[in-house]
Image: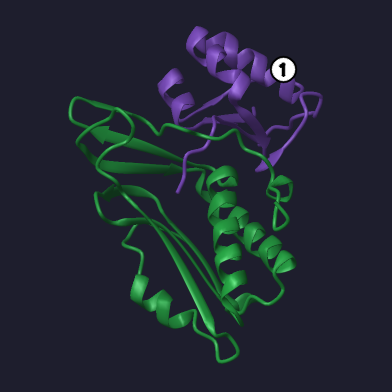
Amino acid sequence: MPSVLFFGPARDATGTRATLIEGRTLGEVVASTVERYGEELARLMPTCRVWLNGEPATPETPVKENDEIALLPPVSGG
Amino acid sequence: MGHDDWIELTSGEIPLAEIAAWVVRPGCGAVDIFCGTAREQSDDRKGVERLEYEAYEPFVVPKMSEIATQARRRWPQVGRLALVHRVGPVVIGEASVLIAASTPHRPESFDVVRWCIDTLKATVPIWKREIWEGGADWGLHAQVLPEVAEVPGPDR
């Protein structure tokens, strides 16, 4: 099952750094993730970037067993 | 390139003096160094005690390397170039980020360093948490991640 990682405000919204979520495509995994964690994460999603194995990817992209999906809220390094 | 780039994510103090000495090149008459330091206030957040940086660690150095590559493409005169960022707790007054560049002449040293820090703040997966008197929250003025190649410059 692909793993989903949460950073910054997304980690606060879910209360976890990582979880495993099923889905055939990136879009499906993201939708199930939002469904699982609810309103607070849903509010963040419009500003989040989604990376698949460290690269931006479209919702149609198929996901495999050991893929790593990351939800990246707006960054604030520096 | 390789040996002329210093790209690092570190949980220890940034070695400012060491980088300042390393960045100097015989063919370069200009060195510009930018340091971002942890500040005790952030807009309405007074009495900030410390910052805590969280990173998507495996992708920080690759992103900063991409910034270095793009910077060299845009400013081929660059001699040495350093991009160093902290992760974990940073106390007030310590450097959280450092950019250093050597170039033959000063205008491009300012330009490349400014472009690198602006691009780092927008594109590298790092989040700052501010811990102040009576609260803790993520950094204000966060930026929605563009790709490095999408950041404009040098002809802004």
Residue A62 falls left or right of residue B132: right
Amino acid, disc 1: Glu
The crowding category of the residue bearing disc 1, from other C-alpha atoms within 10 Å (few below 14, some 14 to 19, many at least 20), is some
What residue is rendered at 57% in x and 85% in y? B28
Name the element at disc 1.
helix
Chain in purple, by letter, is A
Q: Name above or below for residue B109 compared with residue B22.
A: above
Residue A24 falls left or right of residue B138: right
Residue B74 falls left or right of residue B115: right
Chain in green, by letter, is B
**Chosen colour scheme:** by chain
B140 or B56: nearer the viewer: B140
The reply to whether residue B7 is in sight is: no
Residue A20 falls left or right of residue A29: left
Toward the bottom, the furthest residue is B26
Q: Which residue is mark 1?
A: A28
